[in-house]
Amino acid sequence: MKFLSNLRSAWAGLTGKSMDVSALLRGDDLNDGGGASLSNAYQQSVWVYACIQRLGEQLAGVPFTFSRTAGTGEQLIEAGPLVELFKRPHPLQDRFAFWELTAAWLGLRGEVFIVALGSAGEVVPISGMVNGRGSRRIKSLLILSADRMREIVTQSRIDGWHYSGSSQDVMAGMNLLPEEVLHIKRPNPFNPWRGMSPLSVAMLAAQTDYASAQFQKGLMLNNADTGVIITTEQVLSSEQIEQIKGALRERKRKAGTADRPLFLHGGAKVEKPTINAADMQFLENRKFNRQEICAVFGVPQELIGYTEDANRSVSNSARLNFIENTMMPLGDRIEASLETLVQAIDPQAEGWFNWDVLPIMKEAQRARVDTGVKLWAIGVPFNDINENLDLGFEPYPWHAVGYLPFSVARADDLGSESPKEPREDEDPEPDDEMSAEKLMRKLYAAVPKPAHICAPSGSKWLRSIKPSIKAKEGRMRSFFRAQLGRVLDALEKTSPSSSKAYEELFNLANESSELLRRMKPLLIADLEFGGAQLFAESGLVDFTLPPHRATEFLAQRANRLSEVNQATFEQIQSELVEAVANGETFEQRVARVKSVYKEATESRAASIATTETNSAINTGRQVAMEEAGIELKAWSTSNLPDVRASHYKAQADGPIPVNQKFSNGLMYPGDPAGPPGEVINCRCFMYAVLDPEDVKAGAPTEHLDFAAFVARRYPAGLSKEAAT
């Protein structure tokens, strides 16, 4: 004991501090308070500070947005108590400081404590505020020091928190109830009441790095000199030792000055130690310490200024990885914890970080859009692309359909330039080699005479049904492409010596059944849309299509659609018979078949789509009139000079009884029972006349849009629901 007492006295005489005897007995290092002692990593470690700052600055730079969900969808909240509160959470903390402090405490201590204050600066409860009552009491938010919070636990239940503040602090010391404290914390498997600090894991790397920095600092202050060792053969007195030390200090007065000559007497020798390999490795290890600290906080080294191994592409990838794998999970944690506070002020509101506004996220979305364009070009429906790539586009009915670039052709199969598609404001005119009669014959079946194409071009009516036409046009082109593949497969197995064998290329019944299967959902949707459209124009609601009327209509269209395949088969057979007669090669016969389908996709598909759409929608309008008990109907055309004369006369006849045919023999425009010359490519429509005097004002000018109807009627998708 006397030895320890003497040792304690000697230590106190050397350092001016008392010795921890128990530490000595345990074998711990005796730290006199000097040297590389890391007491505050945030203030003393470059990498810890840089990581925490990047987390805070990034979080503060993302808008915290509020919205509420209503019947019309999600609505942003751009003004009100919530917006004002988070715009300036506290007089001492603007919104940037608020989010930076939140990220800092979560990084340093793994938890952050927030209290709500009233108008007089009093603490008010956060949880339990229902029906928006919190908005009248919560005036500001204050982040408290996690180091000064102590949990009050009774019988395995937290009864409150004690804050050991002072009168000089942002808030005086007090006890707080659990509902008065918003506690955001990282999970801690060792303490259910407190969060686990990432810094506790990174502390060893931070201490090692700090010691390395101190070693390097001392080396630089000593002119990169590791010091000298003086050896003598005799014991020197205290005065002699001090003289030698003074001479050495005079020689190296400070960093950056030249060394001065030094003379020693009495046999003293100067030995100069050098930096060994272990010392050099010690300095190199600073890089690994930096990497460990960055890994713990989830901050890429490129974001704290180290780009020696990175180019622009790598830096962008690192930044995107930082946002997606570090910041977004951190934001999700904060959003979930703030839900209680947000709903205390507005029970219907939600608060969330809007990451999409960040430039790196916009760039990432552009890259996903480029990928989506490639997928769309090979026939993947846009709805599937939008969902899988998370593009954020609104769903539209035609997005459920896959499209292909039908104009693509083989490089060795050069053909004439594709015909220009007609504009909405002009009628499709037959080219020099194809009369209207030949066009209609190829569409369905032979007609007795050429017939004009009637189209109220550019009207609101046409715009309202255009999405439906486009959907059928795409489906017809898809059908023709698939049929071309089946025909070419059969052609390859057919003997080229007999034209009779070409009759085996085409199974008319199977092809017609397949075409009806593809068109059925769209036709049923058109029937329902036509009825709903007429009801809307007549001030009625809740149109329901009788199932037997849909069955009757599909039976009628089955015959017309069968004529589509019959016309295709006749064209193919005609081409191949001529090829056999000319002794053409197999490749030449394939080219003839492709030419038939090229014309089908570029011309016939659009005409068939228009005809089928107009027929189905006007049938639905007729059914709606009958179901509603409407007595009079009228015909509407484009009133252009090139309207079919019979259709113009039907319009001029004025209103007629609903169950009576118009003067052109049609029950309504597109009547499936009518002759092709009166139906093909017709875009007239029929409307209800509730009062005979109303017809003087003309047809209705506002119409329900097909896309809006489908979005409401078939929220799960047109093809799935309409098919049932």
Image (spheres, grey):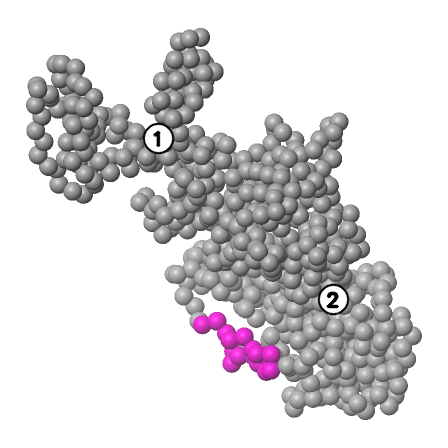
Q: Amino acid at mark 1?
A: Gly
- Which of 490 and 305 lies nearest the eye of the viewer? 305
- Judge from the rendering whether residue 316 lies leftward or rightward of residue 239; answer left or right: right
Q: Is residue 601 above or below residue 192?
A: below
Which residue shows up at 81% across the image and 70% down it?
531
Residue at 18% x, 34% y: name it.
249
* Residue 523 visible here: no
Alpha carbon separation for disc pair 2 and 1:
77 Å
Assign the magenta stretch its main secondary structure: loop
Mark 2, mark 1: which one is toward the viewer?
1
Seen in the picture, residue 236 relative to 486 is either above or below; the reply is above
Badge 2 is on which residue? 709
- Residue at image position (38%, 26%) is 16
Q: Is residue 106 visible?
A: yes
Give the magenta-colored segment's residue range. 417-433
Q: Pick whichever, 309 or 207, lies toward us.
A: 207
Does the stretch in magenta take in 705? no
Q: Which percent across, then down, holds residue 213?
A: 33, 36
Q: Is residue 89 left or right of residue 558?
A: left
Q: Which residue is mark 1?
A: 35
Q: Left or right: where does residue 474 sit relative to residue 716?
A: left
Looking at this view, name the residue that lies furthest to the front: 239
Question: Which quadrant would the N terminus be assigned to in this image?
Answer: top left
Of 228 and 104, nearer the camera is: 228
